[in-house]
Image (cartoon, coloured by chain):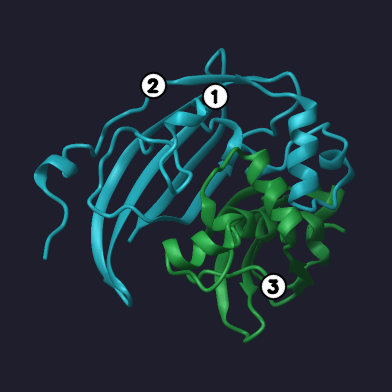
Chain colours: A green, B cyan
């Protein structure tokens, strides 16, 4: 894939993300995060008033960053990335990441993409954007 | 009602002590597996996914240094906010070069803004931090601006 193949409006592949007790435990262990809302259901509900075990915002940020990286593969690299956690998601929800091309700078081989994570109700829980630089 | 006092606001500009870490391939692999990366270079630990840096500088205090919610006491760079329930808000991220195994990196953060808003469920306090990661020789690796929300 090269920058001349890309058109504004092109969609990035959708991917479903279903966190599990195991994946959240391993993620929080890997980042050394002890916040109990991510593994202690009773505490998450009674202690902080969440409807269930909370899927980490930065984990959703990571999933979102993978969307343009997996799309561009070996053809380029991720230069800039931003995301915003707007709505909490809890264990059991299937989230879907995706995006589309918003701008192309052919001369510098830069492609801007708008990104989202949606929940099963179609609400965007985590919007974001990224700039990818293509090798060719 | 304003929750943030001048004393809180005085924390704007506070810089954390620089922390140095050495990156291991095993830590990259653990992160890549837990985040379900699909690129072979991440799963093999040859290169870290960009957001790997999120947990790289987390403090590792003794177990008796944690609050009942599981967050270390005195976290947040010494900032004591009147609201205690914290959540991640979002991040703006620029990677100058990928993180690789064996890298010796230095990270430091600075509070750049502190403000409050009325949310759907009550008041919210937003803390904005700038976080810079460099090599030992000062070469930039990652610059990040992140927001945490206390409610």
The disc, 2 or 1, on the residue closer to the chain's N-terminal end is 2
Residue B17, labelled with which disc? Answer: 2
Name the residue beneath numbered marker 3.
Answer: A92
Badge count? 3
Letter of the chain that mark 1 sits on in the rendering: B
Q: In the image, residue B94 lies at what x, y percent?
A: 56, 43
Are discs 3 and 1 less than 8 Å apart at CB?
Answer: no
Q: Is the N terminus of chain A in the top left, top right, bottom left or bottom right quadrant?
A: bottom right
Provide the residue designation for mark 1: B134
Where does the image place residue A18, in percent across and percent down from the top left?
75, 68
Tag 3 and tag 1 share a subunit:
no
- At a point 32% along the width and 52% down the height, the residue shown is B84
Determine the residue positioned at 25% across, 41% down: B80
Q: In this view, does B148 lie above or below A33?
A: below
Closer mark to the observer between disc 3 and disc 1? 3
Residue at figure coordinates x 57%, y 77% from the top left? A124
Residue B42, x across and y down, in percent: 81, 41
């Amino acid at each position: 894939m090269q920058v001349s193949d890309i058109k504004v409006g092109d969609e990035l592949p959708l991917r479903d993300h279903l966190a599990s007790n195991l994946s959240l435990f391993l993620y929080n262990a890997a980042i050394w995060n002890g916040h109990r809302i991510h593994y202690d259901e009773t505490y998450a509900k009674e202690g902080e008033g969440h409807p269930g075990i909370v899927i980490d915002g930065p984990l959703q940020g990571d999933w979102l960053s993978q969307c343009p990286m997996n799309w561009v593969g070996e053809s380029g690299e991720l230069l800039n990335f931003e995301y915003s956690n707007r709505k909490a998601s809890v264990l059991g929800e299937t989230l879907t990441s995706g995006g589309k091309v918003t701008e192309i700078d052919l001369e510098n081989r830069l492609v801007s993409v708008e990104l989202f994570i949606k929940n099963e109700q179609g609400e965007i829980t985590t919007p974001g954007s990224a700039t990818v630089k293509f090798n060719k | 009602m304003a929750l943030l006092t001048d004393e809180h606001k005085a924390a704007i500009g506070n810089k954390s002590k620089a922390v140095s870490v050495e990156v291991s391939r095993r830590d990259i692999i653990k992160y890549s597996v837990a985040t379900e990366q699909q690129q072979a270079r991440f799963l093999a630990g040859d290169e870290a996914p960009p957001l790997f840096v999120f947990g790289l500088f987390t403090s590792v205090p003794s177990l008796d240094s944690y609050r009942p919610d599981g967050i270390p006491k005195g976290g947040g760079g010494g900032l004591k906010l009147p609201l205690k329930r914290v959540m991640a808000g979002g991040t703006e991220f620029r990677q100058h070069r990928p993180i690789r195994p064996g890298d010796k990196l230095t990270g430091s953060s600075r509070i750049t803004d502190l403000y409050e808003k009325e949310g759907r469920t009550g008041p919210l306090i937003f803390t904005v931090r700038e976080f810079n990661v460099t090599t030992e020789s000062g070469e930039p690796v990652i610059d990040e601006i992140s927001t945490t929300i206390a409610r």
